[in-house]
Amino acid sequence: MAKIQVISRPVFLAPTKGRSYLTAKAAADNEAKALLSNKYPPDRCEYEDGQLIYPGWHWSTDERMQKTHERLSRLLLRQFRNAQRITKKTPTEDL
């Protein structure tokens, strides 16, 4: 019979999104999405007499904002990796 085992693996937290991810890239991507959604909240559709008047807006429909998302995601991932690199270089003290 198979045994259930406890293993520890690195998990990456996206604090603005409030979720954990198994890869740093996924965490950076979703953190960038959460930051952009907070800064640019979506507009809802507007209807009048059953007719669509305003189709609404979300940042993901704008091509420039998609580029901004890619750039922000890349910068967040770079910031995380640089922080990891710095902590590995500094000697740790034994407590």
Image: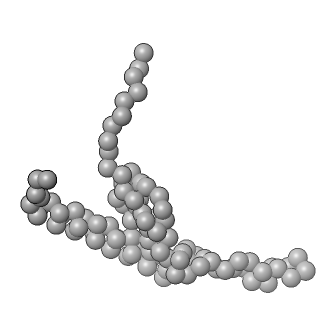
Q: Looking at this view, is 82 or 58 the one in front?
A: 82
Residue 92 position, x and y percent, is 12, 58
Residue furthest front in the image: 95
Q: Residue 75 falls in which quadrant of the image?
A: bottom left
Q: In the shown orientation, is residue 82 left or right of residue 94? A: right
Q: Is residue 62 visible?
A: no
Screen quadrant of the N terminus: top left
Q: From this view, report whether residue 15 is shown above or below residue 41.
A: above
Residue 54 vertical position relative to residue 17 in the rendered view, above or below: below
Q: Could you say which is closer to the camera, residue 83 or residue 64?
A: 83
Residue 91 visible somewhere in the drawing: yes
Drawn side of residue 3 relative to residue 86, left or right:
right
Relative to residue 50, is residue 22 depicted above or below? above
Residue at (49% x, 65% y) in the render? 17
User: Residue 93, position in %: x, y?
Assistant: 10, 57
Residue name at image x 32 percent, y 49 percent = 10
Number of callouts: 0
Q: Position of residue 19 (x, y in %)?
A: 47, 58
Q: What residue is at 75 percent from the left and 83 percent from the top?
A: 54
Q: Residue at the top extreme?
A: 1
Q: Which color scheme does this rendered protein use?
A: one colour
Q: Residue at x 79, y 84 (%)?
A: 53
